[in-house]
């Protein structure tokens, strides 16, 4: 994983086609306590919103991998994040799709090596395998990944 931010990708404003940021309000909970059902519903909502955006812009081939990555990043943020919100960002540029989640936690995300029978611990490995590039902000609060997109969108009419 690379230390940096989505802004470090160097996208000039005119190369950005779509930039959406949504915040999920979090209720305080004890460490290890399950995610609140209302918060957990946001994982599916963000997947659907992102899939609709990718189809709108003409990139349906990115939908499946983007949905998988969104599930991993947002679920990790809800489980392990600190603070009263989780922010999700969908940034589509001329040649890149960037997904970013800010969980408010200074604990740096890292790729685990899970045993074959472990039920958890593969999230960032999956993100790394599906995306072109992934990273974490220097302060540890944001985890992001990118996908290279085709040079010409097949935008639906």
Image: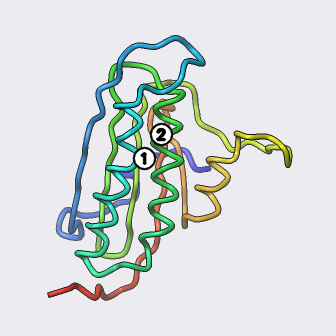
Name the image quarter holding the C terminus.
Answer: bottom left
Residue drawn at 57 percent across, 26 percent down: 107
- Residue 133: x %, y % from top left: 55, 61
- Identify the disc placed on residue 5: 1
Q: Quadrant of residue 32?
A: top right
- Residue 31: x %, y % from top left: 57, 14
* Separation of marks 1 and 2 at Cα, in angstroms: 5 Å
- Lower sequence index among marks 1 and 2: 1
Q: How is the image coloured?
A: rainbow
Numbered disc 1: secondary structure: loop
Q: Residue furthest left?
A: 157
Q: Are marks 1 and 2 in contact (CB under 8 Å)?
A: yes
Read off the residue under disc 2.
Answer: 137
**Label 1 environment density (alpha carbons within 10 Å; few <14, some 14–19, many ≥20):** some
**Height in image: 157 above or below 31?**
below
Residue drawn at 47 percent across, 49 percent down: 144
**Height in image: 64 above or below 124?**
below
Residue drawn at 50 percent across, 45 percent down: 73
Q: Quadrant of residue 110?
A: top right
**Height in image: 57 above or below 112?**
below
Query: In front here: 41 or 129?
Result: 41
Query: In front here: 58 or 132?
Result: 58
Numbered disc 2: secondary structure: loop
């Amino acid at each position: 994983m690379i230390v940096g931010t989505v802004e470090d990708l160097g996208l000039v404003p005119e190369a950005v086609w779509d930039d959406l940021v949504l915040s999920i309000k979090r209720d305080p909970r004890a460490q290890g306590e399950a995610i609140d059902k209302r918060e957990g519903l946001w994982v599916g909502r963000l997947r659907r919103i992102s899939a609709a955006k990718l189809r709108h812009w003409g990139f349906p081939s990115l939908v499946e991998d983007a949905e998988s990555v969104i599930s991993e990043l947002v679920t990790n943020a809800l489980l392990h994040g600190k603070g009263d919100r989780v922010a999700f960002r969908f940034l589509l540029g001329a040649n890149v799709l960037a997904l970013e989640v800010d969980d408010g936690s200074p604990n740096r995300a890292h790729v685990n090596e899970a045993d074959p029978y472990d039920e958890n611990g593969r999230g960032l490995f999956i993100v790394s395998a599906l995306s072109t590039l992934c990273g974490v902000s220097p302060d540890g609060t944001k985890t992001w990944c990118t996908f290279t997109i085709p040079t010409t969108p097949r935008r639906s009419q």
